[in-house]
Image (cartoon, rainbow, N blue to C red):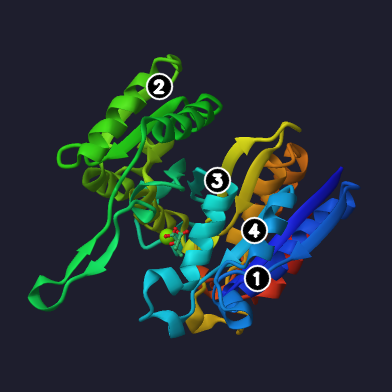
């Protein structure tokens, strides 16, 4: 198969972790005799520096042409006090929207060799295996009106949480289909005791459940969900929620996995005529400027995102499994970066990438 992949390293540790993810992608492609056609483009702070905008047209053009896109991370401290419109993050939100990747799949699982890396008690987290399905192209991240106006004591800031029935239906169907291939349990998370937006969310998800009678649906309020995630994480199979709630809950989920550096993600859009799904793959972590450029960052979230790409965009299940098994093997060997608090000396970013390749 020919795999046409666009790489968007972005900022900070994004550059380092995508380098290892590409190394793994090259290795697995070679081993299974696929040809790789890789291109690279600018996004985020790096793009602002070179072209004055966080999402150059060229980047969108290349992403639309590629079979799949792999992204590192965006964000730089020098933009901390800049309005949202001009920030590196705007590039990330823009590319998600341009590709129409409305469903962000964030698997959260524990590995037996990493139980000690989590601050939570082993018996609570052992065996956790869930996927958070985060709506990614709507809600308060994109809603209008938005902005800051007025002055003095009357200065007013507005954001709008908005969803249409169609937006809720499509992401709900994606989540139900995933649940069908797993333990057949779907938990929809909202704040319907306060927000009209969540009332529509709950109503539509309940209706869509009618198409999936083999899947058991329950609803949780987001505050309770935040608590249940650390009290009883094994109760979750597929968690479906809107954009901002999903952003927040998935960072909490990272604590179950031992480190945010472990979490991969797949953002999926419509199915193309070829049958492949449009996909943007990125680790859940950010650009971590404090450790950028030091070869310390955990590349496993990015490498896991390569596995997700092989599975979802290319339908290469065997190859995806080979990558996931290699990750598990390397974890078992204890060859991990500092975030996972290894007993011995921590491995570097590139050592972990090399170890995953050898294990494949
Ligand atoms: C994430 C990140 C992004 C988001 C930021 C960098 C805009 O936190 O992917 O979880 O909020 O979506
Ligand atoms: Mg986040």
Q: Which residue is mark 4?
A: 60
Q: Residues within 10 Å of mark 1 (few under 14, many from 20)?
A: many
Q: CA distance from mark 4 to mark 2?
A: 33 Å
**Above or below, 17 relative to 60:** below
Q: Please state the horizontal and vertical placement of residue 170, each as a whole percent of the image.
A: 47, 31
Q: Nearer the viewer, mark 4 or mark 3?
A: 4
In terms of image quadrants, where is residue 134? top left
Q: Which mark is residue 208?
A: 2
Q: CA distance from mark 1 to mark 3?
A: 19 Å
Q: CA distance from mark 4 to mark 3?
A: 13 Å
Q: Residues within 10 Å of mark 2 (few under 14, many from 20)?
A: some
**Above or below, 152 relative to 95:** below
Q: Tell me which label, 4 or 2, sits earlier in the chain.
A: 4
**Above or below, 263 relative to 339:** above
In terms of image quadrants, where is residue 294? bottom right
Q: Report the residue at 53% width, 29% height from top.
A: 182
């Amino acid at each position: 198969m020919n795999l046409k992949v666009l790489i968007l390293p972005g900022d900070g540790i994004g550059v380092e972790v995508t380098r290892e993810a590409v190394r793994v992608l090259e290795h697995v492609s070679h081993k299974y005799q696929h040809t790789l056609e890789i291109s690279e483009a600018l996004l985020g702070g790096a793009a602002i520096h070179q072209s004055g905008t966080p999402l150059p047209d060229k980047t969108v053009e290349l992403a639309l042409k590629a079979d799949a896109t792999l992204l590192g991370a965006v964000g730089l401290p020098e933009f901390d006090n800049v309005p949202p419109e001009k920030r590196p993050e705007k590039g990330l939100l823009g590319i998600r929207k341009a590709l129409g990747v409305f469903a962000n799949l964030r698997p959260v699982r524990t590995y037996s060799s990493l139980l000690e890396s989590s601050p939570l008690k082993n018996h609570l987290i052992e065996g956790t295996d869930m996927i958070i399905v985060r709506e990614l192209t709507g809600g308060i991240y994109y809603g209008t009106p938005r902005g800051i106006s007025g002055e003095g004591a009357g200065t007013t800031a507005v954001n709008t949480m908005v969803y249409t029935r169609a937006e809720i239906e499509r992401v709900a169907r994606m989540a139900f289909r995933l649940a069908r291939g797993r333990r057949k349990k779907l938990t929809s998370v909202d704040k319907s005791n306060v927000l009209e937006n969540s009332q529509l969310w709950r109503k539509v998800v309940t209706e869509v459940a009618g198409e999936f009678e083999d899947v058991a649906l329950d609803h949780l309020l987001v505050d309770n969900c935040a608590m249940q995630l650390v009290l009883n994480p094994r109760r979750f199979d597929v968690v479906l929620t809107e954009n901002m709630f999903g952003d927040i809950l998935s960072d909490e989920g990272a604590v179950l996995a031992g480190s945010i550096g472990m979490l991969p993600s797949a953002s999926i859009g419509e199915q193309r005529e070829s049958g492949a799904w449009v996909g943007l793959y990125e680790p859940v972590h950010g650009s971590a400027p404090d450790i950028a450029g030091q070869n310390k960052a955990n590349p496993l979230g990015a490498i896991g995102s390569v596995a997700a790409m092989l599975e979802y965009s290319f339908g290469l299940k065997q190859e995806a499994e080979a990558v996931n098994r290699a990750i598990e093997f390397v974890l078992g060997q204890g060859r991990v970066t500092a975030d996972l608090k290894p007993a011995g000396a921590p491995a570097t970013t590139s050592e972990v990438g090399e170890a995953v390749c050898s294990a494949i």
